[in-house]
Image: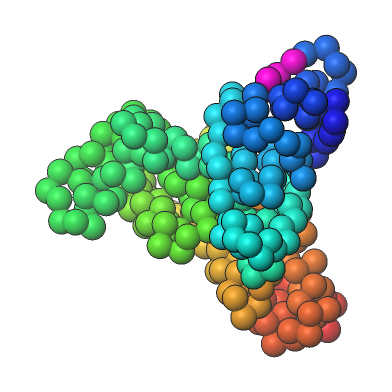
Amino acid sequence: IMSMSFAPNGRFLACFTQTFILTVISSTFETKVLDFDTSEGSSSLPQQMKWCGEDSVVLHWKNLGVLMVGPYGDWLRFPFDNMNNNKGGNLHIVPEIDCCRVITDDTVEILQRVPPDTMSLLRIGSVDPSAMLLDAADAFEAGGSNADEAARTITRTGMLTEAIEVCTEAATRELDVAMQKRLLNAASYGMQFSYKSDEGGGDETKDDYYFEEGGGAKTIMGTKETVAANNDELNPSPPRMLPSATAHKFVAAAQKLRVLNALRNPSVGLAMTSSQYDEVTAAGIVARLVAMKRPALASSICTYVALENSIQA
């Protein structure tokens, strides 16, 4: 064994042997997960071997670029121009909790496996409800006449809420702004049918909404639990529909993306993934921006996400 690297979760160990084979085993040394032969591409040892998240390994050779190996032996090679010329150049791989950063003399790039939600959405021929909702939303934007019927089909299966949440979560994992908008539009399109179904008396999505009845009595998530209230029995007020948990997730995702996109702006240079945002928290991001001497952006984020006054001060 010439090189070793533990996964961030400590469950797996990547080893590179003198026979140019990448081996991944469990940290208990009881299970071999992967053997990947690199001898066809290079007859030298990699300069770096790091984990990309918790389920893929990234290796770097000077003249070959970066090789990413997935958990089932699938691989992708990423050449870097500054490494393939006579000038040489520097390249460093920095592992993160869900990705890795490739830092060169000119750029900082994020390398990440395609998230599961995105795979279920965009896989060719996918029949996942979220993929069907995305197709229906795209058809609606294009003026297709059968878009609404496709969305109603998902509603009748009882999977509409799940499809909306998958589209919402996939949007937060995307780095491309155009794809973020496309996925959020699909989730928004699906929520319109949630409201319509409820107004029409259907049972498919009633469990996704809160109803406030008679000025105070509240039915929670469609269950029979109620909160006592002082209602005027002679003059009951009509039920009022409040945002569902799915709607709250949608708003939180849009808010998160707005902050992340502001941080990813080249003028700021603090690119983060959704998982990193969740770990650092908004307060930690504000602290980093202050350390970077970006008080205006830090103050704007404090106001936008409604941080406590003690943090804003």
Find the magenta span and give its range. Answer: 32-36
Quadrant of the rendered structure where residue 284 is? bottom right
Relative to residue 227, is residue 92 depicted above or below? below
Look at the picture and state if 312 lies above or below 202.
below
Foreground: 19 or 51?
19
Residue 172: image quadrant is bottom right
190 and 92: which is toward the camera: 92
Q: Residue 97: x, y in percent? A: 74, 46
Q: Residue at x 85, y 16 (%)?
A: 29
- The image position of residue 128, as x and y in percent, is 38, 31
Q: Is residue 33 magenta?
A: yes
- Pick the quarter of the image with the N terminus: top right
**264 left or right of 133 in image:** right
> Residue 51 placed where, x, y %?
74, 40
* Residue 218 appearing in the image: no
Query: Residue drawn at (72%, 27%), measured in percent from left and top?
Result: 20
